[in-house]
Image (cartoon, grey):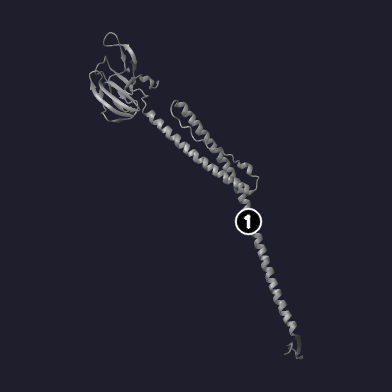
Amino acid sequence: MPDHFTFMIIPNRRSGVKKISVPKTFVRNIIIASVLIILVTLYVVYDYASIKRDRAELARLRQQTKEQSQQFRELAMKMESFADRMEELRQVDKKIRTLAYETNRGKKVPLGIGGADNDIKIKSLLDQDQQKLIAGLRKGIEKLNEDAGDREKSFDELLGFLHEQKSILACTPSVWPVKGWVTSEFGVRQSPFRNGVEFHKGLDIATRFGKEVVAPADGIVTMSIYDSQDGNFVKIDHGRGLATGFAHLSKRVVSEGKRVKRGDIIGYVGDTGRSTGSHLHYAVFVNGMPVNPRKYLRSS
C-alpha cells in the first residue's frame, strides 16, 4: 500500500503537468493540526464570550448589591423612625391613662400594657456588614411587631374603659332639669305649710309656669303618676342605684317604661299637688335614699 499521496497540478498554460508526492503521515498531521486549531479557536471564542458575559453579570450584581445596600439603609432609617413613633404612642397611652386616673379617682382605671423599649438601635448597625444589618432589621421588626400588638391591646382596653365611663357619665344626673331660681335647698328648712321645721328631700326650682322639664341623664321612666302631695310626678331610674324625681308638674309627657335620653322633655313646670306656687321639686335618690342634688349638678 503506497505511503504517499500524489497531487497533480495542471496549469492553464501548455506547460507540463506537475506531480507532488506528499507522505501520508504529513497529510494526517496537517489535518489533525487544522482540527486542533479550529477547536482551540472555538474554545477561545467561547471562553472570551463567557468572560464577557460573566463580567456583565458581575457588574449587574455589583450594581444590584449596591442598590440593595442602599435600600437596607433606607429601611433601617424608616424602622428607626417607626420605633420613635411607637415610643411616642406609648407615651400618649401613658398620659391618657394618667389623665383618666386623675379624672376618675377612686375608680378602677386599667394600668395598661408597658411593652419593652426598642433596644435595637438600627443606626448603630449602618456601618456594620450587611449580614449584621439584616439580622438587626429582622430582630427590630420582631420587636416592633410585638410592641404594635401591645399598643393595640392597650388602646382597646383604654377605649373600653373610656366607653364605660362615657356610659356612666350619660347616666349621671349632672344637668339641671329646668332653668330657674333655687328657692329651697336640700335639708332641714322652715315648713311653708305649718309652724316648725321639716326635712326637704330635694331642690325647689322656681320658674315660669309651663316651662319644659328635661331628663338630666339617660334612664327609664319607672313612675308617671298623679299624687295628692307631689301632684304630677315622674321618676326616672338611671341605673347603678341612681334615680331622679320631678314633682308638681303641670303635665307629664312620658309614660312608665319609656327610655329617655339626657335632654328629653318629660313634662312641664306646674303648681299641682301640695305647692305654694309655680316651681319644680327636683330630687335625687341613691339606693332609694334622697341625697342633695347639688352633689351631681354642674355649677352652671
Q: Residues within 10 Å of mark 1 (few under 14, many from 20)?
A: few
Res 286 quadrant in image = top left
Q: How many labels sit on residues?
A: 1
Residue sitting at 23 percent across and 22 percent down? 226
Q: Identify whether 157 is placed above or below 283.
A: below
x%, y% of residue 102? 47, 26
Q: Which residue is mark 1?
A: 61
Residue type (three-letter) at the residue carrying disc 1: Leu
Quadrant location of the C terminus?
top left
Residue sitting at 60 percent across and 47 percent down? 135
Judge from the rendering whether residue 186 lies leftward or rightward of residue 36; answer left or right.
left
> Does the image show residue 211?
no
x%, y% of residue 51? 67, 63
Q: Identify whether 8 is placed above or below 180.
A: below
x%, y% of residue 172? 37, 26
Seen as rendered, the residue at the extreme top is 195
Judge from the rendering whether residue 180 lies leftward or rightward of residue 111; answer left or right.
left
Residue sitting at 63 percent across and 54 percent down? 63
x%, y% of residue 295? 38, 20
Local secondary structure at mark 1: helix
Q: Identify whether 99 is placed above or below 116.
A: above
Judge from the rendering whether residue 179 lies leftward or rightward of residue 121; answer left or right.
left
